[in-house]
Amino acid sequence: TLLTYTDNTATVGFANSYHVTALYSNPDGESGPSNSVMGEILAPPTELNATVSNPNVPLTWITPFVPARNRDDNQPERDLIGFKIYRNTVLVGTVTNPDVETYTDTNLVPDTYTYTVTANYTSGESTPAGPVQATVTAAFFPPSNLTATGSITGISLTWNRPYPLLTNLSG
């Protein structure tokens, strides 16, 4: 039978060592310890922010603090190597430089999008930062080159249609 335990007191970014023992009754006693394992909650990015610059969504965040620790055989390797960006729970991009705290999701159609960002470590992926939402709207471009010509019968206006022209819009 598989048994589980969740340590809800673990601190993000710090490795913890665990082992378990078995308690017996009739006769009463306790086993020796199991093998030891290391566990760590990997620190996520913080302060995830999304803005809209139609039809793009620039994202920004703060790189997580990764406490320094002595390297030894009992602690897993866990260097920060970048970030993963998710739109509506689907991976849409990666940043492979841990010093870069931005990503722009480009050429989106009008809709509301939900974003999360995780920190990617050599030992795995953090829990996500976010979610944040961004609503991309249709871009309405103005007509250009408006001119007016007066005559005895009135004023005639001419202009160029907007570009790009939306499919449901007439010039």
Image: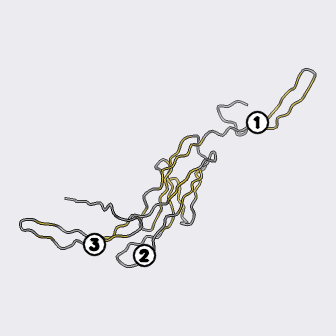
Q: Provide the residue designation for mark 3.
A: 36
Q: Tag 2 or tag 1, which sits nearer the N-term? A: 2
Q: Provide the residue designation for mark 1.
A: 143
> Which mark is drawn over residue 52?
none
Q: Residue furthest front?
A: 9
Q: Residue at x 87, y 25 (%)?
A: 155
Residue type at mark 3? Ser
Scheme by which the image is coloured: secondary structure
Above or below for 93 versus 33 = above
Q: Residue at x 26, y 60 (%)?
A: 5
Q: Provide the residue designation for mark 2.
A: 69
Residue 64: percent from the left, percent from the top?
49, 64
Above or below for 49 versus 40 = above
Q: Residue at x 39, y 64 (%)?
A: 41
Q: Tag 3 or tag 1, which sits nearer the N-term? A: 3
Which sits in the foreground, 68 or 160? 68
Q: Circle 2 — which element? A: loop
Residue 20: percent from the left, percent from the top?
23, 68
Label 3 close to label 2 by CB (< 8 Å): no
* Image-based side of 41 in relation to 30, left or right: right
Which sits in the foreground, 124 or 51? 51
Above or below for 151 versus 76 = above
